[in-house]
Amino acid sequence: MTDPCPLWRPAWSRWLLGLYVAAVLAFLILPILIVLPMSFSDSRFLTFPPPGWSLRWYEEFFASRSWMQAARTSLGVALLATLLATPLGIAAAYALHNTSSRLLRGLRFVFLLPLMVPIIIVAVGVFFVYAKVGLLASIPGLVLADTMLGLPYVMTAVAAGLQGFDQTQELVARSLGMNRLRAFLSVTLPQIRPSVVSGAIFVFIAALDETIVALFISGGANQTLTKKMFTVLRDEIDPTIAAISTLLTAASFALILLLALSRRRPRG
């Protein structure tokens, strides 16, 4: 039986898909649209809509030594984790891409375990290991934990970039006298740069926003911003948290925008 209305059916399905996507986006963006105006409220409590407008809670954040210390810890740990996870992830992805051993290819799933195992299980395991080796409430412990959690992002992004790279170019460079490392740095790495930048940005964002593991292993002078937010929210409803959440969201959005711009290839 033929369709009596073959012309309007594709348009109807596109409208339905568009409405579905719009509903999903609205559901995801709605919490941000609520937190953003609350961060500019002049009320002592979190209220929506705000009774008045003020930069009071942003000033409170930047004037507080404890908040600034937590922010410096989070930014420093995120940066160090990115600098450590990026080269390790590149090396792992490159090795797994070029190996012919099935055993070594199986290691890919080992590297991806931090993404597959529930984060609370990872946090408990890291806590007990750190308790044995004395890394609790330390910057090296936070950096190593965030590096482990961020490594899969770099590996996945770089592996995708290597899939679209013509390996013959590197082989030609090596046949002309370059060693493998120099050929990789001169030929391969520049062409997979967008994938490397993508992985590094995701590591930084994940480390900056990490909360569950930080609750277990950070503390004292090395308390991260997310843990302090959780602690303050547990004790009292402080509108400063709305201001910090807005700043973190803006930072993540800016990094995602940078990622989109870095993946744009010049025309011609």
Image (cartoon, grey):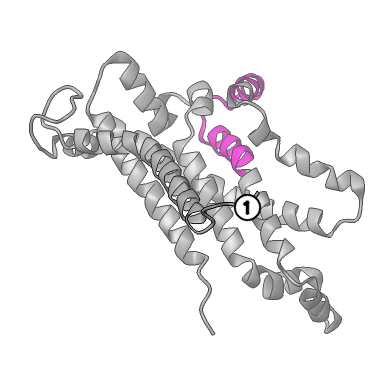
The residue at the point 45 percent across, 24 percent down is 219
Tell me what residue is drawn at x 57 percent, y 32 percent: 141
Q: Is residue 27 magenta?
A: no
- Viewer can see residue 171: yes
In the picture shown, does residue 27 fall above or below 129?
below
- Please determine whether, in this image, residue 250 is positioned above or below residue 35: below
Q: What residue type is labelled 1?
A: Thr
Work out which quarter of the rendered image holds the C terminus and state it. bottom right
Residue 98: percent from left, percent from top: 83, 60
Binning the other alpha carbons within 10 Å of mark 1 as few (below 14), some (14 to 19) or many (20 upward) gives: few
Quarter of the rendering containing residue 112: top right
Picture coordinates of residue 29, whole percent (x, y): 35, 40
Return the x and y of residue 234 as percentages of the image width and height. 34, 16
Tell me the residue that label 1 is attached to: 2
Q: What stretch is highlighted in magenta?
A: 123-150
* Depicted 77 relative to depicted 97: above or below: above
Could you tell whether 221 is left or right of 120 in the image? left
Q: Which residue is drawn at 64% across and 36% down?
A: 115
In the rendered view, does 185 fall on the left or right side of 107?
left
The residue positioned farthest toward the left in the image shown: 52
Q: Is the magenta stretch mostly helix, strand or loop?
A: helix
Residue 136 drawn in magenta: yes
Q: Residue furthest top?
A: 235
From the viewer's side, name the closer residue of 23 and 184: 23
